[in-house]
């Protein structure tokens, strides 16, 4: 029950992803990170320090403080030691920085608006086929919405990006792990057995697939070479990185690729299904775009990704932004290299973060603040009509959800594709 879920703050889908490392003794924080930060902010103001697992963490919940962390133009901050990677993928060793940099460059190129047309046709075909078959073959079956959305996207993205031999049955493990993802980011003894088993199984299947790709030498059969470049990049690290760690790195990548988009689409559907007027408004915009602007659905699906933007589908774009604002926990974490001043709201006082401290930009504090958004707890589908995602990155607009795709050097490299697949779905 979606409405009850919202009012009682029960998390549906099971967890909201949060882009932060986990620290084992922070039980309160671990149980409800955003609630914990919210309470602290109410008590201590918009910049405060907490201690998590022996680390001092400066949390900023005001616009200037968050931008200081997210954009870091003074270059005094860096990504914390890939703790997410290690915990989520059970990566024991260190993945070389050069490889991580190359992977990031690969993602930025392949999943950009320019790269998407290389695989969007296969993606669209598989997505629609999957949804149709689910609807036609089992009209009376009850499927949890997140699975309905997630499995179709997982299959379509996997086949189009990794080729027809990708082990699609890994969705089962993905689903099990995703439901308890926050537990995986905590200490090993808190990881439920079923989840660590699922992770091992998924890594084994990915290992077999990677080995087959490597044996092929030329890449992955049936998939465009540039989109499978990642598998080759992983091979290049094989002399120094054990296979289980390379599998763990791929597993983490798959979570980055899928987890947020599945969740946001599921939440958007819940909002639409719970309010028929809102649903019909969006439906009218999409039908109009298909019938009048593009002629038919097939034509719409062949246009470059940018054409599915604000000029043709402003309400859809806004609906996605609004869902991100409400349901994506936009939190940026960095480690401090040099003394760094984190400003309070009025910029008159600063808290100094010392080398070794962590700083956290809690954009959710802005996204849920009535100083920035009228009635922030409500879903207003047209809230962002007239704004664009690009503006957010340039910092020109404060009316967009802050930090949904990060900002600065580490801005999300998959954001073009994320928006594309969410719109097509
Ligand atoms: C709704 C979907 C998504 C959301 C909300 C999202 C959000 C984010 C955020 C906030 C960051 C910055 C984290 C930080 O500053 O510490 C980020 C980074 C990143 N994202 Fe996404 N993301 C999404 C989908 C994707 C997809 C589909 C891909 C892959 C195709 C992807 C690949 C990446 C990569 C590689 C980075 C690291 C960039 C770097 O460190 O330079 N993301 N994402």
Image: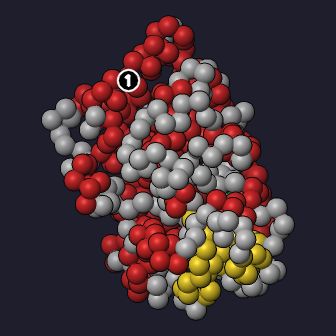
Residue at 28%, 34% (x, y): give it.
Answer: 275
* Image: 199 above or below 24: above
* Image: 303 above or below 129: above
Residue at 61%, 63% (x, y): give it.
Answer: 62
SS at circle 1: helix
Instruction: Examine the image and state in which quarter residue 357 appears.
Output: bottom right
* Image: 147 above or below 34: above
Residue 391 x, y percent position in the rendering = 69, 40
Rendered-image quadrant of the C terminus: top left
Q: Is residue 415 left or right of residue 132?
A: right
Residue at 37%, 34% (x, y): give it.
Answer: 130
Residue at 15%, 35% (x, y): give it.
Answer: 140
Q: Is residue 288 visible?
A: yes
Residue under pointer 1: 281
Q: Residue furthest bottom?
A: 54
Few, some or many residues within 10 Å of mark 1 (<14, 14–19, 20+): some
Q: Residue furthest left?
A: 140
Q: Is residue 328 visible?
A: no
Residue 228 x, y percent position in the rendering = 66, 46
Q: Is residue 155 left or right of residue 208?
A: left
Instruction: Examine the image and state in which quarter residue 129 appears.
Output: top left
Residue 314 x, y percent position in the rendering = 54, 26
């Amino acid at each position: 029950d979606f409405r009850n879920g919202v009012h009682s703050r029960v998390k549906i889908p099971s967890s909201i992803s949060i882009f932060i490392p986990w620290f084992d003794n922070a039980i309160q924080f671990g149980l409800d990170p955003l609630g914990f930060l919210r309470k602290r902010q109410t008590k201590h103001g918009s910049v405060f320090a907490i201690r998590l697992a022996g680390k001092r963490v400066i949390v900023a919940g005001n616009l200037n403080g968050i931008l200081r962390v997210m954009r870091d133009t003074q270059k005094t901050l860096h990504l914390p030691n890939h703790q997410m990677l290690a915990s989520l993928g059970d990566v024991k060793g260190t993945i070389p920085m050069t490889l991580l940099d190359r992977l990031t460059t690969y993602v930025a190129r392949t999943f950009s608006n320019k790269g998407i047309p290389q695989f969007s046709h296969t993606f669209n075909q598989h997505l629609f086929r999957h949804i149709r078959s689910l609807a036609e073959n089992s009209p009376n079956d009850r499927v949890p919405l997140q699975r309905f959305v997630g499995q179709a996207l997982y299959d379509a993205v996997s086949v189009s990006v990794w080729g027809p031999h990708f082990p699609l049955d890994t969705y089962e493990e993905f689903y099990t792990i995703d439901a308890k993802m926050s537990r995986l980011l905590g200490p090993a003894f808190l990881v439920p057995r079923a989840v660590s088993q699922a992770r091992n199984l998924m890594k084994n299947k990915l290992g077999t697939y990677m080995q087959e790709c490597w044996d092929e030498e030329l890449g992955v059969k049936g998939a465009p070479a540039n989109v499978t470049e990642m598998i080759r990049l992983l091979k290049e690290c094989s002399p120094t990185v054990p296979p289980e760690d390379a599998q763990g790195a791929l597993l983490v990548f798959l979570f980055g690729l899928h987890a947020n988009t599945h969740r946001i689409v599921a939440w958007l559907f819940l909002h639409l299904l719970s309010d028929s007027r809102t649903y019909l408004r969006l439906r009218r915009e999409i039908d109009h775009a298909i019938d009048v602007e593009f002629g038919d659905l097939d034509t719409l699906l062949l246009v470059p990704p940018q054409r599915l933007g604000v000029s043709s589908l402003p309400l859809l774009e806004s609906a996605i932004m609004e869902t991100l604002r409400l349901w994506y926990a936009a939190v940026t974490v960095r480690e401090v290299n040099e003394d760094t001043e984190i400003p309070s709201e009025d910029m008159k006082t600063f808290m100094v973060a010392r080398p070794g401290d962590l700083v956290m930009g809690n954009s959710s504090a802005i996204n849920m603040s009535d100083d920035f958004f009228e009635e922030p707890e409500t879903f207003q589908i047209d809230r962002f009509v007239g704004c664009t995602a690009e503006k957010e990155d340039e910092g020109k607009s404060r009316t967009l959800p802050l930090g949904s795709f990060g900002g600065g050097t580490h801005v999300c490299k998959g954001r073009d594709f994320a928006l594309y697949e969410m719109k097509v779905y």
